[in-house]
Image (spheres, rainbow, N blue to C red):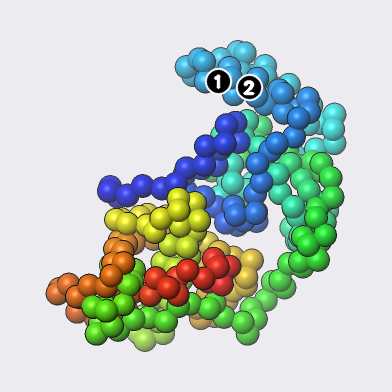
Amino acid sequence: MSGYWSVRHTRGYDRFPEIRGYGTIPADDARHDDLNDFLAAKLRQFWRAQNSRGGWTNELERLRIDVERICELNGYKGLWVDARDYLVHRVGQSFLYDVPMGKRGNLADFAGKRIRVVCSRNGINQRYVRIGVVGDAPEQTKARRQKASGPTSVRPRLPRLLSEDELAYTPHMLVRFRGIWTGAGGMARAYNRGLRYQAAVWHARRFREWAGVWPKGIHEFVIKFGPTDDFEIRTPIGDHQGYLEVELHFEVHSSGSEFVEGNEEVGFNWCAFSLEELEGKPAECR
């Protein structure tokens, strides 16, 4: 799709991808790799060499191998991962992450620790990362236990949907999307509608956090949905999980505005939220 733009983190040699993952490691919990050790120096050397030369060179391969050896000497665990779940897409990227207590999967052994994640190899749809402990996580992180894997009774808290009559006098964000559930049953319609409502609120709040403004125009991004709070978007019905590519068109009307004809049904291909309610903390829509 054209006509959209995404926020890109520009943090030197640890920049994140344009479409950010929110899987095993939530992107909002990743920290800048500000360590000043031998590995950090080698990573900076790698990025300087990459930025000064076109293509992959023998020097870059030598520096990549040096990074691998330093990680091995420091006891870093190595594994192949989905780049979307671990926030890396290029060799040389690194960041810090405080692993909550009760974390499962590949990070279970690092619960309660601050880890460094380093991308050292590229593969088809996968990346090879090195993970090492660099200290203890803060106490508040240790106290925050990961939710159980099964569905819970808690559902996402979303701002109230505005009716067409309220738009003229309410400062609001109007979100347009394609009606993809034509002919589907009521449950399928509610499921898809719920995902897009959550995606609209989630993206708007995080975009404001990243850029300081509400999103405008067409935005295309990927969400990861599932039945628990560990996922970016809570599954509206049942316990399904997976990735969904979303295209949303945002309009901000800070003084309110009349409804534009041609979008006949609220919830089918548009929805609107009060800007005041959207000001809530991003975590409230998870």
Secondary structure beneath label 2: helix
How many circles with numbers are drawn on the protein?
2
The answer to whether residue 111 is above or below residue 155 is above
From the viewer's side, name the closer residue of 199 and 89.
199
Secondary structure beneath label 1: helix
- The reply, left or right, for residue 108 in relation to residue 26 is right
Indicate the position of residue 272 as horizontal and vertical percent values.
Answer: 33, 74
Q: Residue at x 73, y 38 (%)?
A: 130
Name the amino acid type tagged 2.
Phe
- The C terminus: image quadrant: bottom right
The crowd level at tag 2 (other Cα within 10 Å; few <14, some 14-19, many 20+) is many
- The reply, left or right, for residue 10 in relation to residue 166 is right
Indicate the position of residue 203 as horizontal and vertical percent values.
Answer: 45, 61
Q: Quadrant of residue 256?
A: bottom left
The crowd level at tag 1 (other Cα within 10 Å; few <14, some 14-19, many 20+) is some
Q: Residue at x 58, y 19 (%)?
A: 48
Name the amino acid type tagged 1.
Gln
Indicate the position of residue 188 as horizontal and vertical percent values.
Answer: 40, 80
For label 1, the residue is 50
For label 2, the residue is 46
The answer to whether residue 76 is above or below residue 284 is above
Residue 128 shows up from this direction: no
Q: Residue at x 82, y 41 (%)?
A: 134
Q: Residue at x 65, y 81 (%)?
A: 152
Residue 168 shows up from this direction: yes
Q: Quadrant of residue 83?
A: top right
- Residues at discs 1 and 2 in contact (Cβ within 8 Å): yes
Indicate the position of residue 137 as horizontal and vertical percent values.
Answer: 80, 53
